[in-house]
Image (spheres, rainbow, N blue to C red):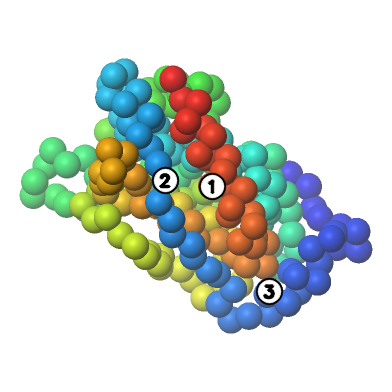
Amino acid sequence: MKEIDFSNWKRREHFAFFHRMDYPHFNVCFDLDITGFAGVIKEKNFPFYFSMIYLSTLSANLVEEFKFRIRDGKVFLHESLTPSFTYMDGKNTEDDLFKMVTVEINGDLNNFIELASAKSKNQKEYFIASDFANRDDFIYYTSLPWISFTHLSHTINLNKNDSVPRLSWGKYYERDSKIYLPYSVQVNHALVDGIHIGRFKETLENQLNSFN
């Protein structure tokens, strides 16, 4: 992680403009063509949720703006991001509450699926405070597999320093013999613009299309 030198940062004027806002966050929703990806996931019996988290994190790590974080008016750049995601077991019908689970990415997809599956099932607490202590290298994930949404907004602190991206997706659906996934990206505009979300979308689409 390194601190950004404002005097040489091309984004310093845009940062100053949006950082003064009471609510500098914005959200973009779009549909992803996951036809090929869904077929491979089914064939290999990979969990859809963990696979999407893994590929989404790889894609976010390739867009520098997604790795900027604000601390007390200063900006830092992380080397890589760590997924922290909601998880609902679904086996206990009496408990429909979710957990927040954090898992490092230190290997390939198979390794991540193994680690994420184990921690998600074994974690007893809904929220582990120590997972978030003095850290902001996260990227937050959640899923609404019951709804094919067209818009989504997240709960967030009214804190202009809150700069962790929130990525979400809903229930996928078929149209014209293809499978689409509603996908949401919420970011802090002091650090990320629409063009950067566009680059993230393109990168993620490439990851999905080359997945095998």
Closer to the N terminus: mark 1 or mark 3?
3
Residue at (69, 47) in percent of width and height: 64
Q: Is residue 60 left or right of residue 145?
A: right
| The label number, if any, that marks residue 19 in the structure image | 3
Residue at (55, 26) in percent of width and height: 106
Query: For the residues carrying marks 3 and 2, which lies nearer the camera in this image?
Result: 2
Q: Position of residue 40 (x, y in %)?
A: 35, 23
Query: For the residues carrying marks 1 and 3, which lies nearer the camera in this image?
Result: 1
Residue at the extreme left: 94
Residue at (75, 70) in percent of width and height: 14
Mark 2 in CB contact with mark 1 (< 8 angstroms): yes
Secondary element at tag 3: helix
User: Which quadrant of the rendered structure holds the C terminus?
Assistant: top left
Residue 80 visible in rendering: yes
Residue type at the position of mark 2:
Leu
Q: Position of residue 162 (x, y in %)?
A: 57, 65
Q: Nearer the viewer, residue 171 or 139?
A: 171
Q: Is residue 73 left or right of residue 140?
A: right
Q: Position of residue 198 (x, y in %)?
A: 59, 53
Secondary element at tag 2: strand
Q: Is residue 189 left or right of residue 131?
A: right
Mark 3 in CB contact with mark 2 (< 8 angstroms): no
Q: Nearer the viewer, residue 63 or 34?
A: 34
The residue at which mark 2 appears reads as 32
User: Which quadrant of the rendered structure holds the N terminus?
Assistant: top right
The residue at which mark 1 appears reads as 201
Q: Position of residue 32 (x, y in %)?
A: 42, 46
